[in-house]
Amino acid sequence: PITLSLAERSLLLGFNALPKLISGEARSVDYDDMAECSMLAGMAISQTKTALCHSIGYPLTAHFSVPHGLACAFTMTAVLKVNMQVDDGRMDKLRQALGCEDLLEAFQDLTSKLGVLNEIKKYIGSVAELEPLIGDMYLKDRADNNLAPVNESIIRQILIDSWS
C-alpha cells in the first residue's frame, strides 16, 4: 500500500507538470512538482524494482542512445494496455487518483502531448530495427515484475502498438 501511494502521487504530479515543462509554460511550482515526482517514483522503484517498460527501454538506450526516460515512456501506454487485461483493482484505483474516466486514454493523451513517438523516431528509423533486440528486452527479473505475464511475442506486439 505504501508503494502504491508513492506511485500514485508521483504519477499525479508528473501528469500535471510534464506537459507544462515540455510546452515551456512551466512555473517554479511545476519544477518542484517534477522533483517530488522523481523522488517518489525512485522511492517506489527502490521497493519494487523496475518492470517491463525499463526492461524494454534498456536496449533502446544502449543501442540507439535514446534517453532512458524517453525509452521507458515509448512503451508505457502499450504496457498499460497489457496490464489492464489482468487488473486486480490497482488500475481503477489509479484512474480515480488521476481523476480520469479512461486510464488508457489518459496515458495516450499524455504521451501524445509529450511527443514521445516523434522523439523516439529521431533515434530509431523504424520498428523493424527493434526486432533483433526483442530477446534483450526480456530481462527475466524485470519482465517478471510486470503485472501481466509477458514473453517475446507480447513484447513484439507492445513495440508494434507503441510505434503506431
Image (spheres, rainbow, N blue to C red):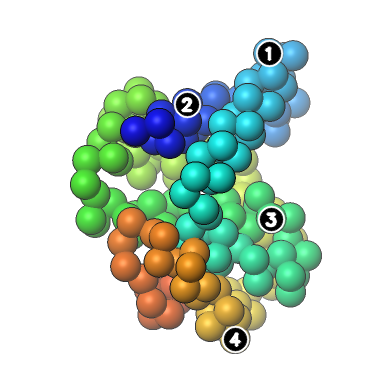
Q: Choose mark 1 or mark 2, whichever is in front.
A: 2
Q: Residue furthest bottom?
A: 132
Query: Could you tell me which secondary element the residue under label 1 belongs to?
Result: helix
Q: Quadrant of residue 24?
A: top right
Dot 2 or dot 4: first in sequence order is 2
Q: CA distance from mark 4 to mark 3?
A: 19 Å
Q: Mark number for residue 96?
A: none
Q: Choose mark 4 or mark 3, whichever is in front.
A: 3
Q: CA distance from mark 1 to mark 3?
A: 25 Å
14 is higher (above) or lower (below) than 32: below
Q: Residue furthest front?
A: 47
User: How many residues crowd mark 3 within 10 Å: few (<14), some (14–19), many (20+)?
Assistant: some
Can you identify the residue that label 1 sits on? 29
Can you identify the residue that label 3 sits on? 68
Q: Quadrant of residue 18?
A: top right
Label 3 amino acid? His
150 is higher (above) or lower (below) than 79: below
Label 2 amino acid? Arg
Image coordinates for residue 3, horizontal then vertical, percent: 43, 36
Query: Could you tell me which secondary element the residue under label 3 belongs to?
Result: helix
Can you identify the residue that label 2 sits on? 9
Label 4 amino acid? Pro
Can you identify the residue that label 4 sits on? 132
What's the residue at 70%, 33% (across, down)? 22
Residue 84 shows in this picture: yes
Asked if disc 2 and disc 4 are in contact, CB closer than 8 Å, the reply is no
Q: Nearer the viewer, residue 17 or 112?
A: 17
Dot 2 or dot 3: first in sequence order is 2
